[in-house]
Image: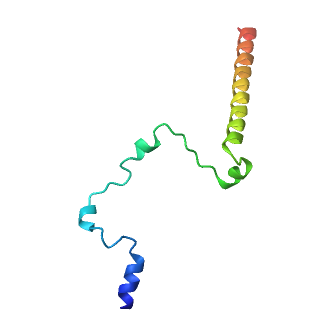
Amino acid sequence: MRKALAKRDRDDLRPEYDLARLKGGVRGKYYKQATAGTNLVLLEPDVARAFPDSASVNRALRLLQEIATKSSKSTRSSSNAKRRATG
């Protein structure tokens, strides 16, 4: 009696489901469809504490992008100026 109860406690499947009919499932079959058009990013816990919501993450990333773009343009223009001076 005890074994039957223990087995039933471990089994989450309802008794009315026929396991023979549930065969053939494919893991991740609709994964690509479900993630199409989304850009989900998981943050490490320390980063998540610094950026509590998506607005703060977007603000920080836009600022970083702006700085990187300005830095890249600055680096290119200074290297072009050096080439003109030496060329």
The quarter holding residue 77 reads top right
Q: Find residue 8 and report its image quarter.
A: bottom left
Q: Position of residue 28 (x, y in %)?
A: 38, 51
Q: In the picture shown, does residue 26 fall above or below 5? A: above
**How has the structure been colored for display?**
rainbow
Q: Residue at x 71, y 47 (%)?
A: 51
Figure check: 5 above or below 25: below
Give the image location of residue 48, x and y in percent: 68, 51
Image quarter where the C terminus lies is top right
Residue at image x 35%, y 86%?
A: 4
Q: Residue at x 35, y 91 (%)?
A: 1
Q: Position of residue 69 (x, y in %)?
A: 69, 25
In the orientation shown, which residue stands out farthest toward the front?
A: 16
- Please identify the residue farthest to the left as the structure is shown: 20
Comparing 60 with 25, the one in front is 25
Which residue is drawn at the image coordinates 68% and 30% (left, top)? 65
As drawn, 45 above or below 72: below
Q: Nearer the viewer, residue 3 or 73?
A: 3
Residue 86: quarter of image: top right
Disc count in the image? Answer: 0
Closer to the camera in the image, 1 or 48: 1
Identify the residue at the far bottom of this view: 1
Estimate the x, y position of residue 39 in percent, counting from the top left.
54, 40
Q: Is residue 20 left or right of residue 45?
A: left
